[in-house]
């Protein structure tokens, strides 16, 4: 072997070693994040007390950093963070029956919020009638801007890549109006479960909830989505006055550490975006390393253009913090200038050309789309006649175990995908019958043409606590309603309503 050839091989081996080292380092970081999440879930709630108004102590490196970056604005910025209370908000699900009237009757005092339709400044309780029935979703007002910018259109394929707890997902679902496909993904199982419950209450049948790492998800959806929302895990500086954990965990190097992970997530998002599709990137941090600098990196690596965002009373990205072309078109929300917490958002359009996509073989097995067996098909034909809205859905009935689902037609084979909700949960197949699910009762338009039985608010409180109720009649399976608000299924037999509110969700209502 020649000396030149030997040296070339040596350099090549060294290059591979460096690549392997980077890959192992990234995996180690991800493992550390999982460990941190676990320890946080185990210990943080018990250890940290919420600071009282005016008691917040900002880290010295944070103060020094933003004194340098904001200059004359810094005092007002620090005052807003330390002396003001976080702003609370919620959105109304206008697709639910009599939504505005029910908000007026059962909702809190509220004023319109600026960044989304049917959005309000005010506080709703998680154990209230409107929240449990999917009429309202509690969401910080600044966070509403992300889905507003996405502006999903009915019929599109949309991915919410870092979706928990579900604020953006429910907002996107409302925009799609039940048409097209929305995949809501969350990597952590505990958070994915919460996401799935919130999606279930909101009621749209074309939402699939997955529980995958982005690099795993991208293998199933190459160049698939019209729009992808990446509300990236970040240093959380914008949440300091809302979340004491974010404040306690912040260190000077946190933004740089988060930026590494954000690049990995964005790379997977790009792989799933159609040529000409739109990527919406957002964070709840002030850090330029995770915002303007991230956009500069993204546009160096991939062919994107930043789109203008038509919103009033917002600030914009700063070119001195990241030299991406069009950075001034990105959006910033500051607590000293806006009614809400800190946020950054950008809307980008892919200029990539279509690349050949290897067609996947049709799936086989329990999670592939396949016809129902003859017995289940017969049960389904009888069952879906009782709920006329089911006949209009663009979805395929799928039996997974004993659970019957309606999977959106736009969804590819479910094989190999870890999901929490592959579509609308119709019910559980028992011997000679289908028992309807809680999700079905809360689905949009489920009550139209279906048997319903009115109950009072005190009876609803009994219902969610798991108690049996006395209601005259003998109608069998019925959707229970409070003032025409669908709240779940019961089985009415000889004046008694057997309770089918899910045992895992039961609670004492307020």
Image: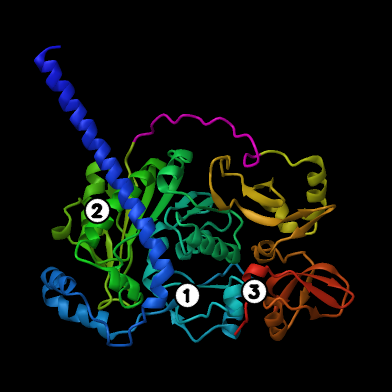
Q: Name the residue under label 2.
A: 294
Q: Which of 396 and 347 is in front in this view?
A: 396
Q: Earlier in the sequence, mark 2 or mark 1?
A: 1
Image position of 119 (left or right of 145): right
Indicate how the structure is coloured in the image.
rainbow
**Cα separation between marks 1 and 3:** 23 Å
Q: 102 above or below 388?
A: below
Give percent across and percent down for residue 169: 48, 60
Q: Does the magenta stretch include residue 358?
A: yes
Q: 219 above or below 443?
A: above
Secondary structure under badge 2?
helix
Residue 423 visible in image? yes
Q: Do the residues labelled 2 and 1 touch (CB within 8 Å)?
A: no
Q: Name the residue under label 3.
A: 506
Which of labels 2 and 3 is toward the front? 3
Q: Name the residue under label 1.
A: 90
Q: Is residue 197 magenta?
A: no
């Amino acid at each position: 072997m020649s000396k030149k050839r030997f040296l070339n091989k040596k350099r090549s081996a060294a290059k591979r070693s460096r690549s392997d080292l980077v890959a192992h380092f990234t995996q180690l970081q991800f493992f550390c994040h999982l460990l941190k999440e676990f320890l946080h879930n185990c210990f943080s709630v018990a250890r940290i007390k919420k600071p009282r108004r005016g008691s917040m102590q900002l880290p010295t490196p944070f103060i020094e950093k933003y004194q340098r970056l904001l200059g004359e604005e810094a005092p007002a910025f620090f005052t807003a963070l330390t002396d003001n209370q976080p702003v609370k908000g919620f959105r109304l699900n206008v697709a639910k029956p009599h939504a505005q009237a029910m908000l007026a009757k059962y909702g809190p005092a509220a004023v319109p919020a600026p960044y989304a339709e049917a959005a309000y400044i005010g506080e709703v309780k998680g154990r209230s009638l409107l929240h449990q029935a999917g009429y309202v979703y509690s969401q910080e007002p600044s966070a509403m801007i992300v889905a507003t910018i996405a502006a999903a259109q009915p019929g599109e394929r949309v991915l919410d890549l870092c979706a928990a707890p579900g604020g953006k997902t429910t907002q996107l679902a409302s925009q799609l109006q039940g048409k097209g496909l929305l995949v809501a993904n969350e990597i952590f199982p505990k958070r994915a479960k919460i996401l799935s419950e919130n999606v279930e209450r909101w009621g749209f049948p074309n939402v699939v909830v997955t529980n995958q790492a982005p690099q795993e998800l991208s293998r199933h959806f190459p160049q698939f989505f019209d729009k992808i929302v990446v509300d990236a895990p970040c240093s959380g500086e914008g949440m300091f006055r809302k979340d004491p954990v974010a404040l306690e965990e912040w260190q000077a190097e946190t933004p740089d550490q988060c930026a590494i992970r954000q690049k990995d997530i964005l790379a997977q998002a790009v792989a799933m975006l159609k040529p000409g599709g739109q990527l919406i990137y957002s964070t709840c941090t002030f850090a330029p390393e995770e915002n303007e600098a991230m956009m500069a990196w993204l546009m160096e690596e991939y062919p994107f253009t930043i789109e203008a965002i038509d919103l009033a009373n917002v600030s914009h990205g700063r070119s001195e913090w990241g030299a991406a072309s069009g950075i001034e078109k990105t959006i910033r929300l500051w607590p000293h200038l806006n009614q809400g917490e800190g946020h950054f958002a950008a809307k980008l359009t892919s200029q990539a050309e279509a690349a050949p996509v290897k067609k996947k073989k049709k799936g086989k097995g329990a999670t592939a789309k396949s016809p129902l067996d003859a017995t289940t098909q017969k049960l389904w034909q009888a069952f879906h006649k009782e709920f006329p809205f089911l006949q209009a859905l663009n979805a395929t009935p799928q039996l997974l175990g004993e659970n019957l689902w309606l999977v959106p037609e736009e969804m590819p084979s479910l094989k190999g995908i870890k999901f929490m909700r592959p579509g609308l949960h119709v019910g559980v197949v028992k011997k000679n019958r289908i028992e309807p699910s809680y999700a079905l009762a809360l689905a949009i338009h489920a009550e139209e043409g279906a048997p319903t039985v009115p109950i009072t608010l005190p009876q609803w409180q009994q219902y969610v606590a798991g108690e049996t109720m006395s209601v005259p009649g003998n109608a069998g399976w019925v959707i229970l309603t409070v003032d025409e608000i669908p709240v779940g299924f019961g089985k009415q037999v000889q004046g008694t309503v057997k309770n089918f509110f899910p045992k895992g969700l039961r609670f004492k209502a307020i």
